[in-house]
Image (tube, grey):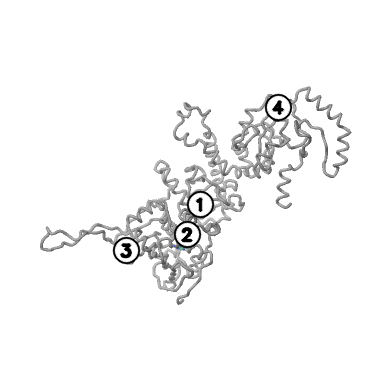
Amino acid sequence: MSKQTHAFQAEVAQLLHLVTHSLYSNQEIFLRELISNASDACDKLRFEALNNTALYEDAPELQVRLSFDKAAKTLHITDNGIGMTAQEAIDHLGTIAKSGTKDFVSKLSGDQKSDAQLIGQFGVGFYSGFIVADKITVETRRAGAAAAEGVRWISGGTGDFEVETITRNERGTSVILHLREEALEYANTWKLKEIVGKYSDHISLPILMEKEEWKDGELIDPSNEEAGRQPGGMVKTGEWETINKASALWTRPKKDISDEQYADFYKQISRDFEAPLTWTHNRVEGSTEYTQLLYIPSKAPQDLWNRDKKAGIKLYVKRVFIMDEAEALMPSYLRFVKGVVDSADLPLNVSRELLQESRDVKAIREGCTKRVLSMLEDLAKHDKAPEASAEVTDVLSEEDKAKLGQYSKFYAEFGAVLKEGLGEDFGNQARLSKLLRFASSTHDTVSVSFADYKARMKEGQDAIYYITADTLAAAKNSPQLEVFKKKGIEVLLMTDRVDEWALNFVHEFDGTPLQSVAKGAFDLGKLQDEEEKKAAEDAAETFKPVLAKLKEALKDKAEDVRVTSRLVDSPACLVVTDDGMSMQLARMLKQAGQ
Ligand code: ADP
Ligand code: MG
């Protein structure tokens, strides 16, 4: 194919305009992005080669090489991974396929400064190269294709790019950055080593650089050593060395991994720029053996409520990357968990379909779920300092101190998703119930557990009372709470949209029934004294004729009209029958157009 010019997709052009016209606080992320592409390309090759070892050609050792040419002002990132065909280069480097980047582009505010900061944090994949380069050349050959089917892709990062066929002996891809004048600092061994150490140490692929050694300058006067030498410099030795740790982090013993390394690894796999809230790392032995490294993010992603959102778990089999977003390894209500599962028992050619059926996978999924729940239970246990007095906090271990307030933070971000588990995972329902927190008529913050509530129940109270509403204010001011306020009985206020649905699956906590205060003609039972009972009965009698009239007048609208003891100040309120759909749910369905 002779040289062809193609236009970038409009979004790419928009992105490139921003990338090339802004200053970055965090320029160096370009290297992380390009190395991660190189590493993905090697993962893809390894995966395809499972069924076709010929793809390795004569270079089975997958690696990334970094090199630069100071005089030519270029920086090369070369991998021997899967490579690209001409069509793939046109498609993958000319359009944005990744939904994350698309979302990102759609969110650009037009304010260069804040937009540029976003790029610095997230990275924009391949296009990050244009942060430091005013021209990028990509030379590539797809594994298995003939040398004559190599491809050269060139772009100056404006509206278009060129593609032509070349001969390329080596399989894989070289990305050649033509560095901008202001970015020449990246043509430097130390600089590159530093950035790799920061972002790409855990890439399980060796990253190589050519070794350099010091060479003294020539003698100024060969006949007189005393006259001194020309300035010396570093020269390349032709020998390549691995500059990253290149070991999969999760395979190393816990004690050898620092918190910072754990956090860096999280950022690498999750593309989150904030540190995780917490994590758990274990080797599980037994009938199914695997390693799990699971993280809870500090912040919920924007698409958390998308039910199609993919699980955040990467599956490896004996360190070989198998797939991203392995949904079979984590239940949907834990879709916010990110991490890695490495199993020794699964076949390397396992497919998504096979995963769904595998008994080992089921065991792994159960194990991962239990781990996450224990991690949350641990945070919940240490969320509040025991009656937070100074002395008590002093005796807390550093580790426990670090957990103070963590569960509340978690719950504010992910509590509502966790509730989906009540209807999804009956086996863990009891454990999940203990993890729930609510606001209540006596506690404004979402901090009351069912157990806390039970501990405060009044003498003679035999149910956990709750009310569901759209907002906390609506719940708190509901007339249905009046009698509870008067009697000093706490009522849980449930304001998450999912509460109504979730509570369909939970009828009691630790032997005490849950009772909606908005349902039916409930009986305050022992909480009502004789006098009150008598008064209620009398009132029912007195109002009989009025009720009959009201019933007649409302016959199409109300199933029944009753005298109630639940009101103190308000004259009337609406309730639903015990088996009826609650008002909250009815409203939700109406909103949803049902
Ligand atoms: P992402 O990596 O998230 O898909 P990028 O913008 O980083 O997004 O890369 C876009 C696509 O270009 C990749 O998905 C891949 O198909 C292709 N690509 C980029 N770099 C390489 C490479 N070194 N080898 C093979 N394909 C690559
Ligand atoms: Mg990428």
Would residue 484 appear left or right of 257 to someone viewing this image? right
> Residue under circle 4?
487
> Residue under circle 3?
70
Name the residue type under label 3: Lys
Between disc 4 and disc 2, the foreground one is 4
Between disc 2 and disc 1, the foreground one is 2
Residue 396 x, y percent position in the rendering? 46, 30
Label located before the other in sequence (3 or 4): 3
> Residue under circle 1?
314
Residue 263 x, y percent position in the rendering? 45, 46
Label located before the other in sequence (1 or 3): 3
Between disc 1 and disc 3, the foreground one is 3
Name the residue type under label 1: Lys
Name the residue type under label 2: Gly
CA gap, disc 3 to disc 2?
25 Å
Q: Quick one: 522 or 134, which is closer to the camera?
A: 134
Rendered view: 510 above or below 360:
above
Q: Is mark 4 within 8 Å of ligand 1?
A: no
Q: Residues within 10 Å of mark 3 (few under 14, many from 20)?
A: some
Q: Does the CB distance between marks 1 and 3 fall below 8 Å?
A: no
Q: Does the CB distance between marks 1 and 4 fall below 8 Å?
A: no
> Residue under circle 2?
125
Name the residue type under label 4: Lys
Label located before the other in sequence (2 or 1): 2
Rendered view: 433 above or below 102:
above
CA gap, disc 1 to disc 4?
53 Å
